């Protein structure tokens, strides 16, 4: 059995779907999917075979798709860098949210009812599980779908992702809190199952995780650069994360190489000093988030004016010319 473990991280969940796209294109399939918070939400859509629905949602996401709030207001509060002049606005937002008992997530509930197909997931043959905290019973819960009663999947998905800033409401008769506060990377849910390999997609945060994963065959995929705030629920922030996840996913599969850039593995000649050339490309601010063929990567470096004129790159200029057949 092959397992996929998806870490929680609110709006950083876009990165998860970018990675999964690369895994899917490579033909990878999973028998068990477990996740926390947004990892559970993404995992349910992956399990029911609708990963493209999730991908498209992340690529077009707006605050109003999740919260009953003014879009322009939310964009300013959540996306702009904090500044002293805006303190009254932040204070107003805090007072308004507190007065209303938290953020109204009616749009999120409607979105889940639209996208989640419990019967489809049950019939998929995939073992699906999630993590949440039952505040009423003062315990963590990590149920698999087959342990849930019919009709409980969407309430449990909400429970797994129920952030403290959400309006406090009962789900299935109890109060719940985001499972990230118990186990944000719930690989331990796999104990007791005959798992051959584990693919874990990380969204580094301060939430508790139990590492290292105790299994001989683990592939850990971690963002290669810092991700935006966990409250950046807007396509201007999530689209770049989809691309970054996709490229990092391809790198984890070995189809591209590079510490910072992404160069097609099969295009790199033997003995090529990719590390040195990456350092030069980074210094020259060559575009990072795309897949390069080797010759194309060299040409992007070669055509840079600073590379052409600076004495610092004299030796590398000659080497690049040889690679490109210009000498």
Image: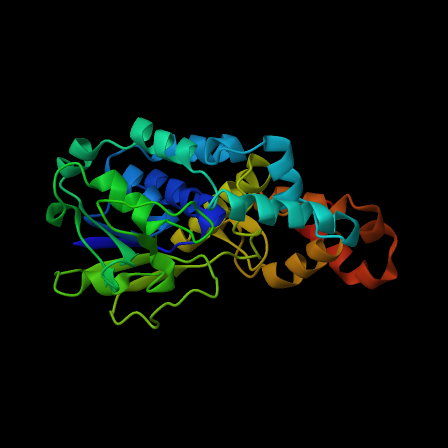
* Residue 193, quarter of the rendered image: bottom left
**At which x and y percent is residue 192?**
12, 64
**278 or 129, nearer to the observer:** 129
Q: Is residue 131 visible?
A: yes
Q: Residue furthest front?
A: 99
What residue sits 47% from the left and 46% below the top? 102
Q: Which quarter of the rendered picture does the N terminus lie within? A: bottom left
Vertical arrangement, residue 81 with respect to residue 140, above or below: above
Vertical arrangement, residue 295 with respect to residue 116, above or below: below
**24 or 119, nearer to the observer:** 119
**292 or 96, nearer to the observer:** 96
**At which x and y percent is residue 184?**
36, 61
Vertical arrangement, residue 187 with respect to residue 57, above or below: below
Q: How is the image coloured?
A: rainbow
- Count up the numbered dots: 0
Vertical arrangement, residue 282 with respect to residue 247, above or below: below
**46 or 158, nearer to the observer:** 158
Q: Would residue 178 be found to the left or right of residue 10 on screen?
A: left
* Residue 142, quarter of the rendered image: bottom left
Q: Residue furthest top?
A: 114
**At which x and y percent is residue 187?**
27, 62
**At which x and y percent is residue 30?**
23, 47
Q: Would residue 232 be found to the left or right of residue 283 on screen?
A: left
Q: Is residue 28 visible?
A: no
Q: Would residue 133 be found to the left or right of residue 101 on screen?
A: left
What residue sits 22% from the left and 41% below the top? 153
What residue sits 87% from the left and 57% below the top? 310
């Amino acid at each position: 059995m092959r397992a996929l473990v998806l870490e929680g991280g609110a709006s950083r969940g876009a990165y998860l779907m970018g990675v999964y796209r690369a895994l899917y294109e490579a033909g990878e399939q999973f028998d068990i999917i477990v996740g926390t918070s947004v990892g559970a939400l993404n995992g349910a859509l992956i399990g029911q075979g609708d990963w493209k629905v999730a991908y498209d949602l992340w690529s077009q996401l707006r605050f109003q798709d999740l919260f009953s709030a003014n879009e322009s207001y939310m964009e300013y509060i959540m996306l702009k860098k904090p500044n002293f002049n805006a303190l009254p606005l932040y204070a107003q937002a805090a007072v308004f949210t507190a007065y209303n008992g938290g953020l109204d997530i009616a749009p999120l509930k409607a979105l889940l009812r639209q996208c989640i197909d419990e019967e489809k997931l049950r019939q998929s043959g995939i073992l699906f599980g999630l993590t949440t905290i039952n505040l009423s019973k003062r315990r963590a819960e990590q149920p698999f779908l087959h342990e849930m009663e019919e009709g409980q999947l969407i309430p449990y998905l909400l429970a797994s992702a129920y952030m403290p800033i959400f309006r406090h409401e009962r789900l299935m008769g109890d109060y719940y809190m985001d499972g990230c506060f118990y186990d944000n990377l719930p690989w331990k849910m796999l104990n007791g199952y005959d798992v051959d390999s584990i693919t874990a997609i990380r969204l580094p945060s301060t939430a508790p995780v139990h590492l290292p994963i105790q299994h001989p065959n683990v592939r850990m995929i971690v963002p290669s650069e810092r991700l935006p705030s966990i409250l950046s629920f807007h396509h201007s922030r999530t689209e770049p994360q989809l691309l970054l996840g996709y490229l990092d996913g391809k790198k984890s599969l070995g189809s591209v190489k590079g510490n910072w850039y992404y160069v097609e593995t099969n295009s790199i000649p033997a003995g090529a000093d990719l590390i040195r050339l990456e350092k030069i490309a980074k210094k020259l601010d060559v575009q990072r988030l795309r897949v390069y063929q080797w010759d194309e990567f060299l040409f992007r470096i070669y055509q840079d004016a600073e590379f052409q004129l600076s004495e610092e790159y004299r030796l590398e200029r000659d080497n690049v010319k040889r690679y490109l057949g210009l000498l």
